[in-house]
Image (cartoon, rainbow, N blue to C red):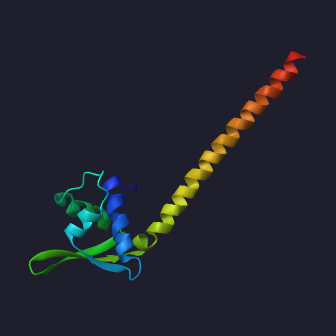
Amino acid sequence: MVLNKKEKNLMEYIYKCAQEKGECLITPIEILNNISFDLDFREEEIEPTMKALQAEQYFSYDHVYKNDQLIYAIVLKEKGICYERDKRTKRKKIAQSLILAAVTALIGVLIRTIVAAITKK
């Protein structure tokens, strides 16, 4: 599944927090303070986004309360641990596709030029 912008931003932050130990504790306030400001991400959207990422097997999480404050206890799963590597692989594949398209277009122009030069004689 392709993640939407909100899921990507949330996963980026969770991965950053949990990458060393594979787990972390995060409050909703920390999430909102670390999500890109140009993204309209509201507190009521955190839970559905967390559930979507959990359903996609990036991590599992539980609610913990300390002094009546909600804290998410997050443990990365295999897909979450590989998140950064998978992101780099996708970027690499896109770059390769763009290079292939450019080379193919260049070869097409070259062939057209050669054919045009041959037919003029």
Where residue 105 sits, quadrant-wise, is top right
Identity of the residue furthest to the right in this view:
121
Q: Is residue 92 left or right of residue 66?
A: right
At which x and y percent is residue 111?
78, 31
Residue pictured at 40% horizontal, 55% vertical = 2
At which x and y percent is residue 16?
38, 71
Query: Is 29 placed above or below 113 here?
Result: below
Res. 78 visible in picture: yes
Q: Which of the two residues, 90 or 71, is positioned nearer the viewer here?
A: 71
How many marks on residues? 0
Query: Is 105 placed above or below 30 here?
Result: above
At which x and y percent is residue 21?
38, 83
Where residue 13 sits, quadrant-wise, is bottom left
Q: Which of the two residues, 88 or 58, is positioned nearer the viewer here?
A: 88
Q: Is residue 103 left or right of residue 39?
A: right
The quadrant the C terminus occupies is: top right
Query: Is 4 placed above or below 107 here?
Result: below
Q: Is residue 94 left or right of residue 30?
A: right
Residue pictured at 20% horizontal, 56% vertical = 42
The quadrant the N terminus occupies is: bottom left
Residue pictured at 47% horizontal, 67% vertical = 84
Q: Is residue 66 left or right of residue 74?
A: left
Identity of the residue furthest to the top in this view:
120
Res. 51 visible in picture: no
Query: Is 88 placed above or below 25 here?
Result: above
At which x and y percent is residue 49?
26, 60
